Image (cartoon, rainbow, N blue to C red):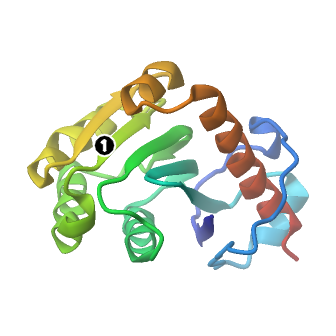
Amino acid sequence: MRLYRAQSANRRPSVDAFPSVPSARSPRVARTDRGADAADARVQGKFNQMSIAYRIKEPDLVLEVWVGTIRKEELFEHERRLMSDPQLPSAPRVIVDMTGASLDPALTRADIREFVDFYQHYRDKKTGTKIAIVAGKDFDKASLYSQLVAQWQVKAIVFTTFTPACTWLGVNETEVREWMEQIHAELLDDSTSDP
C-alpha cells in the first residue's frame, strides 16, 4: 500500500469520524509528510493533514481512500504517485471512497478539466480503466470528472453507496469494505502516531 499525506490548512475530520480497525503496517508504506502543525493537530484530535491512500490488490484492483479537504495540488500529487507505482497494472478497476473527504471549494471546472487532461501522460495505464467513485457531498464535481475522463477511454461512474459500485466493478463488497476500513485505520493511526 502507498500511504502519503500532504499539508493542508483546511479543517479535518476528527479521529473518531471513522471506524477503528486494528491494522498491521505494511512494509511497503510510503509516506510524504509536510507541515509543522501535526503535533498540535494530534493534541486537538484532528487531522491537519490531507490524506489519500491507495492499495493495489491483485490482479487489477486499486482501492483508494480520501480523507479531509482535497486541494488541486494534492490531486495531481496523488495521481503522479499512483501512476509511477510499478505494481499498478494497465486498465485497473478502481474504487474510490470519497465519503470521508471533500473537494476544495476553490476547485473549478477548469481545474477538473486540467486534472483529466493530465491523463494524456499516462494513456498506456489509463485506457480501459473502470473507476467507481463513492462520493459524498461532492457528487457533482465527481460526476463532471466522470464525464470528462471518457475522452481517455476510461469508464467512471459516481455512486452514493458501495453496493452498486462494487457490483459494477465485479468485486466482493464485504472484502472491499474491510480493506477500506483498514486503510482508514492506517491513515488515522499514522496521523496520530507521528512525533
Q: Secondary structure at mark 1?
A: strand
Q: Nearer the viewer, residue 73 or 84?
A: 84
Q: Amino acid at mark 1?
A: Lys
User: What is the quadrant of residue 80 in the picture?
Assistant: bottom left
Other residues around mark 1 within 10 Å, as few (<14) / some (14–19) / many (≥20): many
Q: Is residue 41 visible?
A: no
Residue 44 in the image, given as x and y percentages of width and height: 86, 54
Is residue 104 visible in this depiction of the protein? yes
Q: Quadrant of residue 89?
A: bottom left
Residue furthest out toward the front: 59
Q: Is residue 42 left or right of residue 169?
A: right
Q: Is residue 63 above or below residue 89?
A: above
Residue that lies at the very extreme toward the left in this rendered image? 151
Give the x, y percent position of residue 185: 77, 49
Q: Can you say whether 185 is above or below 86 in the image?
A: above
Picture residue at 88% right of the left edge, 77% below the top: 195
In-image side of 165 versus 68 (left or right): left
What residue is drawn where x is 14% and y is 45%? Answer: 150
Q: Residue at x 59, y 63 (%)?
A: 9
Position in image of residue 189 (x %, y %): 83, 57
| Coordinates of residue 143 in the picture (x, y in percent) | 27, 34
Q: Which quarter of the image is occupied by the N terminus? A: bottom right
Left of 46 or right of it: where is 133?
A: left
Q: Pointer 1: what residue?
A: 130
* Residue shown at the point (71%, 37%) measured from the top left: 178
Where 59 sits versus 131, above or below?
A: below
Q: Picture quarter containing residue 91?
A: bottom left
- Frontmost residue, 115 versus 157: 157
